[in-house]
Image (spheres, rainbow, N blue to C red):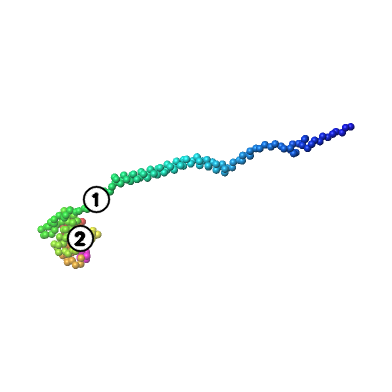
Amino acid sequence: MTSPSLKIGAMGDETEPGLGADVPTEVHDPAPQPQTPLAYSVAAAETVELTRSPWRVRLLIAGVILAVAGAVASVIMLAAWGRHERPSAALPPTTTTQPNPRPLQYDSRGVPMVPKDPTPKEQQQVLVATFDHAGIPYSNPVAAAIDADRVCRYLSSGHHTGSELLGWVHWTHPAFTNDQVGGFAGASVGIYCLQYAYLFDPTDVGATS
């Protein structure tokens, strides 16, 4: 009986792959890494910035041009205004002058008469002439007119009797005589407030009011 013979091959003749033999390998590129949200945002921003940059430059240039044009227009307008709006020469102030008083007229007794529609100057002129005729003292024409106007204001405050008026004139002018008191009161009323003439002339229509 023949025993089966074993064939033992040399090392490496009938060996399994991977037990010592070189196995050819393939070289592959690394798999692309997934893009993170941050990286995507940065890339998008860079793209937008590159896209917008030309417009920003154009807008900046346009703004500068407009500013320069506005400044030039302002200078031109100011120059034109200076040529056409030159200040005119100052006009002299206007003064209102009252006409000269009319000449005095006297009655048969030599008492000055009040003209029709007298001006303030004419009233003062008649008053001073009356005071001079009656010997009533006064400091100056203006003060005399002011004093006579006070008589009218006293009467308009409710004092409507002759005795009240004469007493008030005597109290305000203690140096006056009785004749001067009567003359001062009569001249003041007759020239400045004729509506109270009934105090000295009972026949005046005002005496019944």
Query: Which percent across, then down, holds residue 207?
Result: 19, 57
Question: Which range of residues does the magenta coloring cover?
Answer: 168-172
Secondary structure of residue under mark 2: helix
Residue that sits furthest to the front in the current view = 10
Left or right, 91 with reference to 12:
left
The vertical placement of 39 against 192, above or below, is above
Tell me the amino acid under the disc marked 1.
Leu
Q: Could one spot residue 35 in this view of the protein?
A: yes
Numbered disc in front, either 2 or 1: 1
Residue 183 picture location, percent across and down: 16, 62
Rendered position, 100 above or below 37:
below
Residue 74 point in image, percent of width and height = 35, 45
Report if residue 148 is visible in the image: no
Residue occupying the point 40% across, 42% down: 65
Place of residue 30 in the rendered image (x, y in percent of width and height, measured from the top left): 63, 39
User: Going 23% across and 59% down the picture, which residue do you hit?
Assistant: 153
Kind of residue at disc 2: Val
Q: Quadrant of residue 203?
A: bottom left
